[in-house]
Amino acid sequence: MTKLTQLMSPFDATTVQPDSGLQQLPIGTYNAMIEDSEIKQTFNGNGYYLRLSLKCIEGVNEGRAGFMNINIGIESEKAKEIAFKTLSAVCRATGQMMLSDSRQLHGHVIRVEVALQAEGRGGEKGYTEVKRVIMMNDDQPTQAAPAAPAAPAAPA
């Protein structure tokens, strides 16, 4: 079988800006829309994580993509506790308090803080990642709050 190598029409690369690859979001705080999600196997194969694909919706980084990985299926109890707190923050920020499918998060805007990651797989340094989710209305980190006592009924 002969491989097809001839383009249908000539391509002039000078007329199209080159793709510079996936660029990391710089350190900062951003309003970002959750565009996509996927459950993926961890690098070492010992668990799985939820990967949220985010897109900045304003400012000089508007349109820039980022990712948030949440290790929801991992053996370490401490890592699982951190992951579930992070997922709770995402759910609270999106109003999706009962999550059964990560697609429920798609289209929701969350405020995220991006920070420098100390070290990654293989020891690489110098990349950024989403470190926390911030409530849209007060710039405080989202966290599980104790149940508030019921307010007394107003007199009629």
Image (cartoon, rainbow, N blue to C red):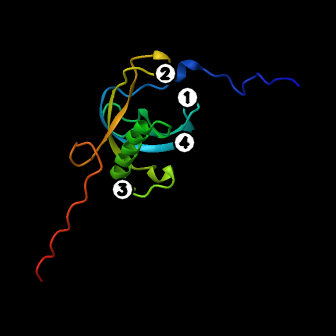
Task: Name the secondary structure under disc 4.
Answer: strand
For this rendering, which residue is in front, 24 or 68? Answer: 68
Marks 4 and 2, how far apart at CA = 19 Å
Residue plotted at (34% across, 45% down):
110
Q: Which mark is residue 121?
A: 2
Residue plotted at (46% across, 16% down):
123
> In the figure, is residue 47 to the left or right of 64?
right
Task: Name the secondary structure under disc 2.
Answer: helix
Residue 129, given in percent of the width and then of the height, sits at 39, 29
Sequence-earlier tag: 4 or 2: 4
Residue 90, given in percent of the width and then of the height, sits at 37, 47
Residue 87, given in percent of the width and then of the height, sits at 40, 45
Circle 1 residue: 43
Marks 4 and 1, how far apart at CA = 13 Å
Q: Which residue lies most toward the right here?
A: 1
Amino acid beneath label 4: Ile
Query: For residue 152, which quarter of the picture?
Result: bottom left
Q: Are marks 3 and 1 in contact (CB under 8 Å)?
A: no
Q: Are marks 4 and 2 in contact (CB under 8 Å)?
A: no
Task: Name the secondary structure under disc 3.
Answer: loop
Amino acid beneath label 3: Gly
Q: Which residue lies most toward the bottom here?
A: 156
